[in-house]
Amino acid sequence: MAKQKSPGDCHDAFDLVAFLTTMKIKRLDEDLARKIAAGEVIERPASVVKELIENALDAKSESISIDLIDGGISSIVVRDDGEGMSADDIALCVQRHTTSKISEEKDLSRIATLGFRGEALASIAAVCHLRVVSKTPSDATAHELRVSGGELGKVAPAARDVGTTIEVRDLFYNLPARSSFLTSSRSEFFHCNRIMHRLALCSPHVGFNVTHGARMIFSAPPVSDLQDRIGQLYGAQIGRAMIPISAEKAGIAVHGYISSPEVRRGNRRDQILSINGRAVDDRGISYILQSAYRGILRPGVFPLAVIDISVPYEEVDVNIHPRKLEVRLASRQAVQDLLDRALKKALASRYVVPTLSETGEKTEQPIRMTSSPQPRLDLRQEASARQREIETQKVRIRSDRRVIGQLQQTYILVESPQGLEIVDQHIAHERILYEKLSREVRSGKVAQQRFLLPVRVELPFESASTLTAAKDILAKVGIDIDDFGGGTFIVRGYPSLLVKTQVQYGFQELLEKVVDALQEGVKLKDVLFDHLMAELACGAAIKAGDRLSLDEQQELVDRLLTMENPYTCPHGRPIIFAISRHDLDKRFKRA
């Protein structure tokens, strides 16, 4: 028996017919489709520069020159000495989805080139006047192709050596909507320059020459070592201040350079990260980098870094971002752990100790002579007296560092196997206290000293409200306070590790510094604790001007050398300043 149609069925059928006869979906014409596709890849002149340089690198170029006019808005010309293209390849390269880098689906799982989609040149050609000139080693002559707004001309003979030249004129001339969002020539050049710097740092074996208008911006000949390329782009002094990092495990390798604590920036702009030579943006890796400097640099300050991470090609997916700025890693945790270990090892090494030759400062002062009679100096008598003083103090030396004495009750002079080291006694003690307190806080077992007579502290209203709101946080680092009202606080307990020294200096200034740390607005709990612990350690540490016995000086130096990072304080200042025997010999004209 046939099923009867309900009124609803008839109504549905009627609506479907009406929809089909009035539908508004249309197939876009080819020109509009090209412009939309170009919008995904080409955002500004810097996008063009990136794609063209990556193509040149994929062509195994040894030298690349980039000439810009008006920040790349009027003209971008990229020349390379790579493999070049034949006449047939030139005709195909500006068409969509044409590439020499992959040919089948399985190639997507092992991409070793920077480009692979076959979209870049087609997208660029759709929104500018384009000229491509190229020659292969086997061709007798070069060939050229002109494209205007996606309209192809004919391939014709041309003149140039082996390699490729691509000229981009009047970017977005036929796309006013995108053109209106471009900023000034200066600003657009800034974005181009950032891209060129990143790519030059990721490929130190390739030479780069960059001009803007008639001005040479930078010239970086090919070098074999990344540190040399850093010196080319940032200056020799920064190049010398970079610390090498290296680690390998289970097919993953981390190599690169990070800056010593005295070289820092106010943003992350000079942190260049690459995966298999591809410059990428990765928040996870950036966080690992910043975490490694926790306790070395204060919050809001960032290190320079140029780091490349090599992973098996099949373990990285590069096809997840329109402009290939992000990748997906199959073994992300393993990569982060290896990087974290490499960074911490480097930052705990002697590379972070500043030396006399690194500062380049001349501190020679004229020696003032007086005409008053000088007492006769008996060296043997003086030496004997000094020997008796040392023997009386019975100094125990537990390392290869021997304390010579204290300079102006601030610096400890230490003889090392390499020469002389000058240790800031306050910062050294601060580092020791900071690391000990950090271990107690992270274990959840902060030993606390309760006061029989609580300490009273007065704070302004704004500071008082901040301290009251952070009472629980302070308790976790061993500070027990009560709000007495009216800006008055009672300190009832303090970390046992710090209390002896802190009692001598008082708590008023310390709590004011703690309030400043809390008011900086740091949200990450670990970072906040680090900041607080740094302030607490600083407050309790030995001060400049405190006289120390030779035994106390030696004990301080020996304990310092057992720390995870004995070279920088939690605020990023150097603890040790080294003068090598070679530098001393040079100063005294012995070398």
Image (cartoon, grey):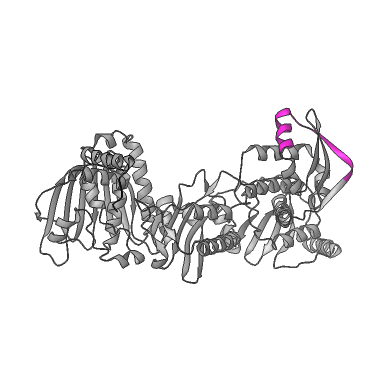
Q: Does residue 478 show up magenta in the picture?
A: no
Q: Nearer the viewer, residue 105 or 524?
A: 105
Report the residue at 53% width, 52% height from top. Answer: 287
**In this view of the protein, can residue 589 be seen by the observer?**
no
Q: Is residue 140 above or below residue 529?
A: below
Q: Which stretch appears magenta?
A: 451-469
* Residue 39: x %, y % from top left: 29, 43
Observer-nearest of 110 and 367: 110
Q: Residue 459 colored magenta?
A: yes
Q: Residue furthest right?
A: 452
Is residue 41 in view from this perspective? yes
Q: Could you tell me residue 445's position as x and y percent?
A: 77, 56
Residue at image position (63%, 63%) is 419
Q: Is residue 345 left or right of residue 374?
A: left
Q: Is residue 229 left or right of residue 500?
A: left
Name of the residue lying farthest toward the front: 1
Left of 55 or right of it: where is 453?
Answer: right
Picture coordinates of residue 211, whole percent (x, y): 29, 46
Picture quadrant of residue 381: bottom right
In the image, residue 30 above or below residue 136: above
Outermost residue to the bottom: 250
Query: How many circles with numbers are drawn on the protein?
Result: 0
Quadrant (top left/top right/bottom left/bottom right) for the C terminus: bottom right
Above or below, comparing residue 242 to residue 457 in the picture:
below
The answer to which quarter of the image holds residue 312 is bottom left
- Residue 511 image position (x, y, % from top left): 75, 39
